[in-house]
Image: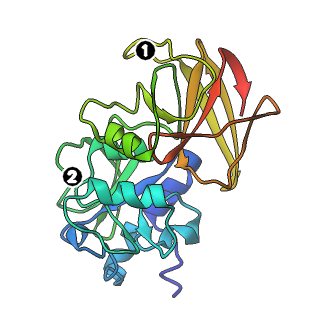
Amino acid sequence: MDRYLEAGPITRYLQNRAEEARYLSWIPPAAYFNKGYLTSQKPEDWAALLLGRAVLFRLHDALGYSPIQLPRYWSYIRATNRLPVYYNAAVLQLPSLKDLRLLGVRYVIGAQGVGLPPGLSGSMVASERGSDLYQVAGSEPRVSVLSRWTRVPGGVEALRAVRDVSFDPGTSAVVEGEPGFSAAGKRGELAGSATYRETVPEDISITASASAPSVVVVRNAWDGGWSATVDGRPAPLLRTDYFLQGVAIPSGTHEI
């Protein structure tokens, strides 16, 4: 038990990067098991931070094994997998760069000697007992400020839109609801920047600066219990990119 509770090199590296250190693990062949990493519980598996071990160290894991998963997140994970995934498991059998960008994942833990999934690139930043930690090239931050978006009437259309091969979550958003103004950004144009602070998982503070009216995409799962304010005034929390949060802001610098 003492060894299980001890933070190793991979854990310490992620701890030092706070909110921007969201990660997922990709350890084949267990990644292709229809119940995910449920049986990966031996000491040699511990460094991969599977099965909710991240909770012990206050890390940000994008996947896991839990009986409670929000419906939109649950259905996105299953839609993007090629093989069936059973009830409680949340695993990406072959994660794409789009998957990682939508989930706000910056780091991938892989098995030593295997490397990253096909189509991904990055640099190895830490190693520990059979596992390597990679920082992924082309990842998206926890928050993006985007002046281009497409409105859709509901979840079916939103899921279809984010899974379309032409969709780029780094330059545009898919929005359900009314932002309050029209999208005016140009393709490939970044509208601004944002900083993300999390005192507890339920209390997020964002400072966002935008050169045009924008949607601030927060890569946390949307749920009906969340509310938002902009500069202290209540603001709609939009379902964005099918399962994420979004807040519309006018141009300028604002506190969300």
Mark number for residue 117? 2
Q: Amino acid at mark 2?
A: Pro
Q: Secondary structure at mark 1?
A: loop
**What x and y, as percent, mark residue 28?**
20, 66
- State the image quarter where residue 24 is shown: bottom left
- Residue at figure coordinates x 18%, y 70% from the top left: 29
User: Residue 45: horizontal and vertical position, in percent?
Assistant: 33, 76
Give percent across and percent down for residue 4: 48, 81
**The furthest residue to the right:** 232
Alpha carbon distance from label 2 to label 1: 29 Å
Q: Residue at x 30, y 65 (%)?
A: 131
| Residue at x 60%, y 16% (from the top left corner) | 213
Quadrant in which residue 25 is drawn: bottom left
Q: Residues within 10 Å of mark 2 (few under 14, many from 20)?
A: some
**Mark 1 highlights which residue?**
189
Q: Amino acid at mark 1?
A: Glu
Please state which of residues 200 and 83 is positioned toward the viewer in this rendering. Answer: 83
From this viewpoint, is residue 62 visible?
A: no
Q: Earlier in the sequence, mark 2 or mark 1?
A: 2
Residue at 64% in and 20% down: 209
Screen quadrant of the C terminus: top right
- Residue 84, x across and y down, in percent: 24, 68
Residue 92 falls left or right of residue 217: left
Between marks 2 and 1 in the image, the one whose residue lies nearer the viewer? 1
Query: SS class of the residue under badge 2?
Result: loop
Dot 1 crowding, Cα within 10 Å, few <14, some 14–19, many 20+: few
- From the viewer's side, name the closer residue of 235 and 111: 235
- The answer to which image quadrant residue 173 occupies is top left
Q: Which mark is residue 125?
A: none
State whether residue 28 appears in this view.
yes
Pick whichever, 116 or 183, lies toward us.
183
Height in image: 93 above or below 164? below
